[in-house]
Amino acid sequence: MLNPKNILISGAGSGIGRALAIGYSCKESNIFLCGRNLEKLEKTKKICQALGANIIIKSIDVTNNELLKSWIDDIDKSFNLDLVIANAGISAGTSLSNESFAQIKGIFDVNVYGVLNLIQPAIENMKKRGRGQIAIISSLAGFKGLPSSPAYSASKAAVRVYGEGLRGNLKQFGIEVSVVCPGYVKTPMTEINDFPMPLIMTPAKCVNIIKKGLAKNKSRIAFPCALYFVIWFLTLLSNNITDPIFARLPGKKPLQK
């Protein structure tokens, strides 16, 4: 969608979410930001307001389905949301040990059900208007099950495939759907990684790619291109070949208790 005016972004307290809010901020924009940390949201709000945007923030957990739906419905009474970006997500891995069930559930609650909780009420309102755009932030990690972060990979694969199917399903209602699959981006989420991250990019560069892709209504926005090609190629190979390769990957740190 070109030049969306009313935009909702989850996970906007830092990282890609904050960068998206900044990237879309202008005098004509009304941007609704949610996240769990009110202090971080206030910081994002201050930056975006300096760029002329009208910013409304809400401290809310995307796993809270009823509260999130109520907030989105309230927004839609005064503002017709043009673009909803499901960005909130958490990352964790195994560090060479088994993932706990609590960690697996926590990842799926945020990365999968948190996405559904955000986009479903927005979709219902967009259907009534016959227009709108949904962007789901997945990951290049969602193309292959990684031994270093199986639950994270699975959660990102789930929303990627769901979004790609949803695109065709919602086209008849005038709703555009794009799935965004970034590689490594310099955010608080990747700061804890103590291993090399190839072709890591700044949030600003990441957002520039996302904005261009959404403006063109691209089905899949995957980057950086070189890393995307490598991962895509590996998905074509037999698991007998790729399993030993991925088994050598360093372990991702588990969620902090």
Image: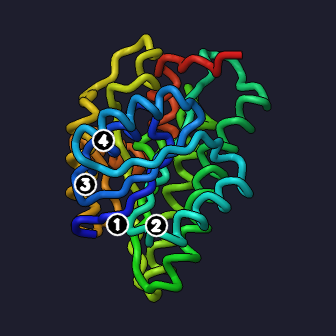
| Mark 4 or 3: the one toward you | 4
Q: Tell whether label 1 touches label 2 (CB within 8 Å).
A: yes
- Count residues near mark 4 (Cα–Cα under 10 Å), then give few for <14, some for 14-19, many for 20+: some
| Mark 4 or 2: the one toward you | 4
- Compute the Cα span from label 1 to label 3: 13 Å
Q: Which residue is outermost to the bottom?
A: 172
User: In x, y percent, where is residue 219?
Assistant: 34, 66
- Which residue position is annotated with label 3? 211
Q: Tell whether label 3 touches label 1 (CB within 8 Å).
A: no
What type is the residue that disc 2 sits on?
Glu
- Count residues near mark 1 (Cα–Cα under 10 Å), then give few for <14, some for 14-19, many for 20+: some
Total numbered labels: 4
- Which residue position is annotated with label 4? 49
- At x 50% / y 40%, what residue is drawn? 11
Q: Nearer the viewer, residue 139 or 150?
A: 139
- Count residues near mark 2 (Cα–Cα under 10 Å), then give few for <14, some for 14-19, many for 20+: some
What type is the residue that disc 3 sits on?
Lys
- 140 on left or right of 119: left
Identify whether 134 is placed above or below 233: below
> In the rendered image, which quarter contains the N terminus?
bottom left
- At x 72% / y 49%, what residue is drawn? 64
Mark 4 lies on a secondary structure that is helix
- Compute the Cα span from label 4 to label 2: 34 Å
- Which residue position is annotated with label 2? 164
Q: Which residue is outermost to the right?
A: 101
What type is the residue that disc 1 sits on?
Ser
| Mark 1 or 4: the one toward you | 4
Q: Nearer the viewer, residue 117 or 99?
A: 117
- Compute the Cα span from label 4 to label 3: 19 Å
Q: How is the image coloured?
A: rainbow
User: In x, y percent, where is residue 8?
Assistant: 45, 55
